[in-house]
């Protein structure tokens, strides 16, 4: 059983690492960013509502996200565990998640914080070239991260659930560090 939450700034390698680890542990990789990009591509109601926020590098409002995460985590494929990537993104989402997990009787193992210095992040994001990865939007996403998401580091540290991993090392070394955490 593996239940992990991935935290980290945009460009920290969260998505890549969460996917590798989920495959290795045979649990679903649940990325709210991927779900939202899928909804935008399929032009669903959610996608149409979310697109503008994503293009601007802002968080999509909680009321569009919470139900989506609730039903995804309650899916049949989560009985052996899950890796959550990109959620929670602010303290109110984290509080919602605590209540939700208690309701569906899931306890998570820990919260992994992928640590990467700012200058590395910006150059990685520029290289990635996703549609929401241009200079101005990157700066905005980083400030949104600092203001709204980074308080979660202390939120989980105070609960003694936080494990920090140096994300500024070769991809395989980060993966190896994460596997050790899961094995512990
Ligand atoms: P990501 O792929 O995790 O970097 O997410 C891409 C974009 O999707 C973000 O910049 C937000 O606009 C939106 N997004 C993803 N996850 C969330 C979330 N938990 N809450 C609000 N917006 C989100």
Image (tube, rainbow, N blue to C red):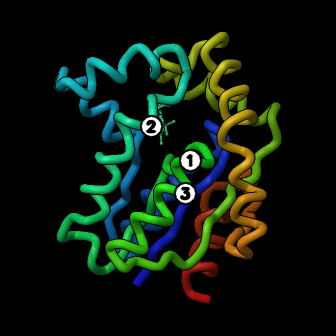
CA gap, disc 3 and disc 1: 5 Å
Quarter of the image for residue 12 reads top right
Q: Are marks 3 and 2 in contact (CB under 8 Å)?
A: no
- 80 displayed left or right of 22: left
Name the foreground residue: 141 vs 46: 46
On residue 95, the disc is 3
Q: Residue at x 72, y 45 (%)?
A: 150
Between disc 3 and disc 2, whose residue precedes?
2
Q: Residues within 10 Å of mark 3 (few under 14, many from 20)?
A: few
Q: Which residue is mark 1?
A: 92
For label 1, the SS is: helix
Relative horizontal placement of residue 169, taking residue 79 as reference (left or right): right
Marker disc for residue 62: 2
The picture places residue 143, in percent across and down from the top left corner, at: 72, 26
Q: Quadrant of the C terminus?
A: bottom right
Q: Residue drawn at (50%, 75%), measured in percent from left and top? A: 108
The residues tagged by marks 3 and 2 sit, at their Cα atoms, a distance apart of 12 Å
Q: Do the residues under discs 2 and 1 have CB atoms within 8 angstroms?
A: yes
Residues 42 and 155: in front is 155
* Contact check, label 3 and label 1, Cβ < 8 Å: yes
């Amino acid at each position: 059983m593996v239940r992990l939450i991935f935290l980290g700034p945009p460009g920290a390698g969260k998505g890549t690492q969460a996917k590798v680890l989920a495959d290795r542990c045979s649990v679903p990789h649940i990325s709210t960013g991927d779900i939202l990009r899928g909804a935008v591509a399929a032009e669903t109601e959610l996608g149409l509502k979310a697109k503008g926020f994503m293009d601007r590098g802002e968080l999509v409002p909680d009321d569009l996200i919470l139900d989506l995460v609730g039903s995804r985590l309650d899916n049949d494929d989560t009985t052996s565990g899950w890796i959550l990537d990109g959620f929670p993104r602010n303290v109110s989402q984290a509080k919602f998640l605590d209540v939700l997990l208690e309701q569906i009787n899931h306890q998570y193992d820990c919260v992994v914080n992928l640590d990467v210095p700012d200058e590395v992040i910006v150059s990685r994001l520029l290289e990635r070239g996703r549609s929401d990865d241009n200079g101005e939007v990157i700066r905005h996403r980083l400030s949104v991260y600092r203001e709204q998401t980074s308080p979660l580091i202390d939120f989980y540290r105070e609960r003694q659930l936080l494990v920090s991993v140096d994300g500024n090392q070769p991809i395989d070394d980060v993966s190896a560090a994460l596997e050790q955490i899961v094995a512990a």
